[in-house]
Image (cartoon, helix red, strand yellow):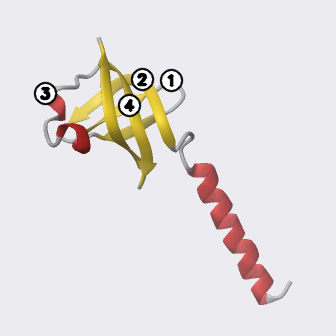
Amino acid sequence: MNRLGTVAVLGLSTVAAWVVAAPSDARGSHTGIVERVWEDGFRLNTGNQTFSVDSWDVYGDNTAQFIRVGDRVTITGEFEGGEFDALTIQVNH
């Protein structure tokens, strides 16, 4: 294989690995249990995956006033930069 062919194969391998590593359902709605809370986000466990949620657009730096560990929440938004950017958050008590 020539040098250009090798680079193309390596490039495809990198893209394929990135696509596989991306969280499922990059855009949409998720429901789960809050495992940890910080000022502008929280960690959500859906039962199938666990990921960080950026809640700044909803609560600013006041997430802990609205979300508690153990809360069951439903979020809508999209994955971006390794975390889920929430557009809406519904706490299901």
User: Residue 76, position in %: x, y?
Assistant: 40, 35
Of 53 and 3, nearer the camera is 53
- Nearest to N terminus: mark 2 or mark 3: 2
Q: Residue at x 64, y 58 (%)?
A: 17
Secondary-structure class at tag 4? strand
Q: In this image, 24 relative to 45: left or right?
A: right
Residue 32: give its label: 2
Residue 15: give its label: none
Three-letter residue code for mark 1: Gly
Q: Residue at x 64, y 64 (%)?
A: 15
Labels 1 and 2 touching (C-beta < 8 A): yes
Instruction: Quote the CA–CA distance across marks 2 and 3.
Output: 19 Å
Instruction: Quote the CA–CA distance across marks 3 and 4.
Output: 17 Å
User: Residue 62, position in %: x, y?
Assistant: 13, 36
Secondary-structure class at tag 2? strand
- Nearest to N terminus: mark 4 or mark 2: 2
Residue 71 in view in this figure: no
Task: Identify the residue position indicated by label 3 in the image.
Answer: 65
Instruction: Quote the CA–CA distance across marks 4 and 1.
Output: 15 Å
Q: In this image, 18 relative to 72: left or right?
A: right
- Nearest to N terminus: mark 4 or mark 1: 1
Instruction: Quote the CA–CA distance across marks 4 and 2.
Output: 9 Å
User: Residue 82, position in %: x, y?
Assistant: 43, 51
Task: Identify the residue position indicated by label 1 in the image.
Answer: 47
Residue 75: give its label: 4
Q: In this image, 33 relative to 67: left or right?
A: right
